[in-house]
Amino acid sequence: MPSPTDRYRTDVLRPGWQQQGRKTSVDHVLSKDLVVEDAGSGFCGAVVHWENGLVVLEDRRGKRRSFPLGAGFLLEGEPVALRAPSRSTQARASRSATHTASGSRVGTRQVTRVALPSRIYVEGRHDAELVEKIWGDDLRHVGVVVEYLGGIDDLPALVDEFAPARGRRLGVLVDHLVPGSKESRIAEQVAASRWGGFVMVTGHRFIDIWQAVRPERLDVAAWPDVPRGEDWKKGTCARMGWPHRDQADIARAWQHVLGRVRSWDDLDPRLNTEVEKLIDFVTQDHLGED
């Protein structure tokens, strides 16, 4: 039988009873593209800006919301208190920002050019988001617009409508482009068309663009081996210990993966090579233009 003293050990009027058993938030210094979740609202997004005690998060749909700095956030499921970096840290980061995420040197004038007639289409929403994150600054500087291609089946009609020509080239990055696949047959069809000389269709051989991210960025030795016939994204999330019940879980998992990518050094060189080839192809008629 509990003693009279024991009876009052869980007194809800005792100061601090609300925190009993809860995890303590750990301080975490803010950085661009850090993916966190606001514990109160469930809003999950990447850090895009912070100022005057507020942090701005952007979710995968481009929606932005502001939250007060401090406790109340989750980082990979663990409670954190977000803190702004010190002034000296920000100053050092500013001085060291001499290259873009793709490795290009930042010039003294970063002027976005008027969009060229040439275009790059990227199949897959996650693929397009990754290309934008790493090569977006470079592409805006040279005036190349990147557009989202919903599916490879739409490519022949898109090419006919675009009518590529000299000075109006079309580059296409295809998801999981392997010999003998439907994707490769459509790419060959486009290459053999009357537009073929001004269209480049290339791609990566990864099962999913997630695999283009070096696994060590996610603190694992290799991406999980998911058997054929099993949904790769859900299977990967399950083996990584991430929630994977619905599409919202998959979206959060991708934001976590994308948030770990800082530059093209975090990507498989095979993807970097194909994207750089596309950029060179669509800009070759415009070299030397002001």
Image: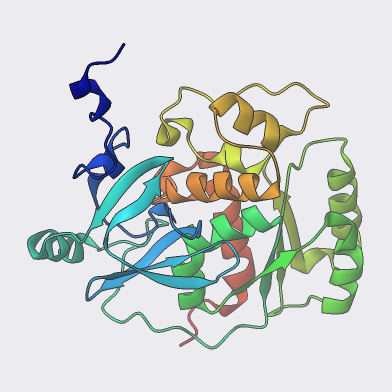
Q: Which of 201 and 124 is in front in this view?
A: 124
Residue at the extreme top = 1
Query: Which quarter of the rendered picture does the C terminus lie within?
Result: bottom left
- The part of the image, by quadrant, that contains residue 71 is bottom left
Q: Nearer the viewer, residue 282 or 124?
A: 124
Left or right: where 288 falls relative to 243: left
Residue 253's place in the image compared with 98, above or below, is above
Left or right: where 165 falls relative to 266: right
Q: Which of 275 and 49 is in front in this view?
A: 49
Residue 206's place in the image compared with 264, above or below, is above
Q: Is residue 229 visible?
A: yes
Q: How many labels does the image show?
A: 0
Residue 67's place in the image compared with 247, above or below, is below
Residue 278's place in the image compared with 106, above or below, is above
Name the residue located 52 percent from the left edge and 51 percent from the top edge: 255
Q: Is residue 207 visible?
A: no
Left or right: where 130 falls relative to 138: right
- The part of the image, by quadrant, that contains residue 46 is bottom left
Name the residue located 48 percent from the left edge and 43 percent from the top edge: 267
Left or right: where 28 falls relative to 165: left
Residue at the extreme left = 88
Q: Position of residue 14 (x, y in %)?
A: 20, 42
- The part of the image, by quadrant, that contains residue 228 is top right
Q: Where is residue 261 in the image (x, y as percent from the top left)?
A: 43, 48
Name the residue located 68 percent from the left edge and 37 percent from the top edge: 233
Name the residue located 44 percent from the left edge and 57 percent from the top edge: 40
Q: Position of residue 242 (x, y in %)?
A: 55, 34
Query: Which quarter of the rendered picture does the N terminus lie within?
Result: top left
Question: What's the image's color scheme?
Answer: rainbow
Q: Position of residue 143 (x, y in %)?
A: 54, 79
